[in-house]
């Protein structure tokens, strides 16, 4: 950039900063008794304290300032809860007061301002993820797991990127449940009998990665609104491109489903979740009427959330097992004893596999998909643990820190599934020591589907294959570094060698 252009840019920023500090800051309300926290810098607040892995940065700050801490991200007040007691106060005791979502750019440009649909979670819980509906999709989960096992069998003896197989599995499950069929194929082509666009796994993976990156970024304009128009990091432009790209796909998917409804008329029967959403959009008795954008937003959340979080949790689970060979041996021993060598694992077997359940719980304790949950916003001024939290404050619950709190967990950094044999702590939002899916009004509505997919997949991965690290890589050398997006994946995708443990006929279905 030329020197004159830089000078003009800096002049604009400095003038805007002076105006903001002189006039706008005068009207800012301040709490009489705010939670403790570090002193904010002018303009940026405490953004300088947020590292590449915010959940770890916040944990270190909480060790200094306490389990209830106030920060300022630019001009936005932020509170972080980092203990069981704080999680209960925000997600249970004062759940209604902290149930709003922040009005960030990602919601405006990608999520169709979805926060306006108050009934969305009730719709998901009662209409889309009911026990009866999930049971009706059991055959889909079983079939997609078998497809993955067959693909891994074909790669026997080779080093594989497990993430690719897991993402295709979870995408297959969620697309068939939500959309009625797979729209991601090895070669992009028109769908069977419809004109809905298909895409290759690489194309879909690229779109998912961009979606998650944009949901996890610290966009300066969200925290310093008077700089929003400059889009200094270019994130808003990327969000607009993402909305256009994903929006074209969603528009065509809705058109295809509506065309079938019109074609079948009175004989129409809902076959998938998108059919159900479109029927609900026609229901004028709903307190808040669903429109086309609302349906697209819910569908988008289902596709991305259902595909990504389960796949990454499973990759972490296998990583921890390869890092801890004794735990892997115990899990395999349980499967050999309960299932035997002549069949694959089915969902009806899962209640008889307590060690597999414990492995999943331990994985979610150490590697929650959303380490600080989705951000909440105070709807009204509230007193929390004797401190004032003003309306408009953004609230994060650091469940990653709670899951590694030495006051709650013995040897918290170690992978010990056996710890769950000694306690009845669960992941369904009732036990605040372990909140990978959140709790209260904003709890993940797809928890039951996620748990079924993860347990069935992990059990079959371990029962169907011997897993080892590539030659020359020891368990001690296996990196467990994280990256930060909307979720927290491995920084380096897991590479592992697979060898079949069962007769070939079980993988092919012959």
Image (cartoon, rainbow, N blue to C red):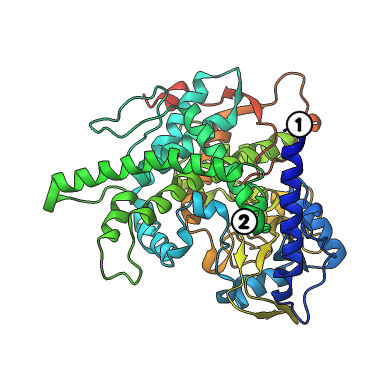
Q: Residue at x 25, y 33 (%)?
A: 194
Q: Would you say residue 421 is visible in this rendering?
A: no
Neighbor class of circle 2 (other Cα within 10 Å; few <14, some 14-19, many 20+) is many
Q: Earlier in the sequence, mark 2 or mark 1?
A: 2
The disc placed on residue 17 is none
**446 relative position to 26: left or right:** left
Q: Which residue is mark 1?
A: 478
Q: Which residue is mark 2?
A: 436
Q: Residue at x 75, y 38 (%)?
A: 4
Q: Name the outermost residue toward the right.
A: 64
Q: Would you say residue 430 is visible in this rendering?
A: yes
Q: Residue at x 60, y 23 (%)?
A: 160
User: SS for tag 2?
Assistant: loop
**333 relative position to 59: left or right:** left
**23 relative position to 348: left or right:** right
User: SS for tag 1?
Assistant: loop
Q: Nearer the viewer, residue 50 or 130?
A: 50
Which image quadrant for residue 397?
bottom right
**285 relative position to 233: left or right:** left
């Amino acid at each position: 950039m030329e020197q004159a252009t830089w000078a003009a840019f800096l002049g604009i920023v400095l003038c805007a900063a002076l105006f903001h500090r002189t006039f706008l800051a005068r009207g800012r309300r301040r709490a009489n008794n705010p939670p403790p926290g570090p002193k904010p810098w002018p303009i940026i607040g405490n953004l300088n304290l947020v590292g590449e892995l915010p959940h770890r940065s916040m944990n270190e700050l909480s060790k200094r300032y306490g389990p209830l801490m106030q920060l300022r991200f630019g001009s936005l007040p932020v509170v972080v809860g980092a203990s069981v007691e704080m999680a209960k106060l925000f997600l249970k005791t004062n759940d209604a007061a902290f149930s709003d979502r922040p009005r960030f750019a990602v919601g405006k440009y990608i999520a169709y301002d979805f926060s306006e649909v108050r009934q969305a979670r009730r719709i998901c819980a009662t209409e889309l993820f009911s026990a009866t509906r999930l049971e009706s999709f059991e055959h889909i989960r079983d079939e997609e797991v078998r497809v993955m096992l067959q693909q891994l069998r074909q790669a026997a003896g080779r080093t594989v990127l497990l993430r690719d197989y897991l993402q295709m599995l979870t995408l297959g499950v969620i697309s068939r449940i939500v959309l009625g069929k797979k729209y991601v194929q090895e070669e992009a082509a028109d769908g069977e009998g419809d004109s809905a666009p298909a895409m290759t796994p690489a194309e879909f993976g690229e779109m998912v990665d961009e979606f998650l990156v944009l949901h996890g970024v610290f966009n300066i304009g969200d925290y310093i609104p008077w700089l929003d128009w400059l889009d200094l990091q270019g994130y808003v432009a990327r969000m607009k491109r993402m909305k256009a790209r994903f929006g074209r796909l969603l528009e065509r998917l809705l058109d295809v489903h509506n065309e079938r409804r019109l074609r079948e008329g009175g004989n129409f029967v809902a076959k998938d979740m998108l059919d159900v959403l479109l029927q609900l959009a026609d229901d004028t008795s709903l307190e808040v009427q669903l429109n086309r954008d609302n349906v697209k937003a819910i569908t988008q959340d289902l596709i991305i959330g259902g595909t990504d979080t389960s796949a990454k949790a499973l990759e972490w689970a296998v990583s921890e097992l390869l890092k801890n060979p004794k735990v892997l041996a115990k899990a395999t021993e349980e499967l050999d004893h309960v299932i035997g060598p002549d069949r694959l694992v089915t969902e009806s077997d899962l209640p008889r596999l307590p060690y597999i359940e414990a492995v999943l719980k331990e994985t979610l304790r150490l590697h929650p998909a959303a380490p600080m949950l989705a951000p909440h916003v105070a709807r009204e001024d509230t007193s929390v643990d004797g401190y004032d939290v003003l309306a408009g404050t953004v609230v994060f619950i650091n469940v990653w820190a709670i899951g590694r709190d030495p006051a709650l967990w013995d040897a918290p950094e170690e992978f010990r599934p056996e710890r769950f044999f000694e306690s009845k702590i669960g992941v369904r939002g009732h036990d605040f020591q372990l909140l990978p899916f959140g709790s209260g009004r904003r709890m993940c509505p797809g928890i039951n589907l996620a748990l079924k997919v993860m347990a069935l997949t992990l059990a079959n991965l371990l029962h169907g294959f011997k897993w080892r690290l590539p030659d020359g890589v020891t368990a001690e050398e296996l990196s467990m570094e994280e990256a930060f997006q909307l979720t927290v994946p491995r920084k380096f995708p897991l590479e592992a060698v697979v060898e079949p443990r069962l007769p070939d006929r079980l993988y092919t279905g012959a």
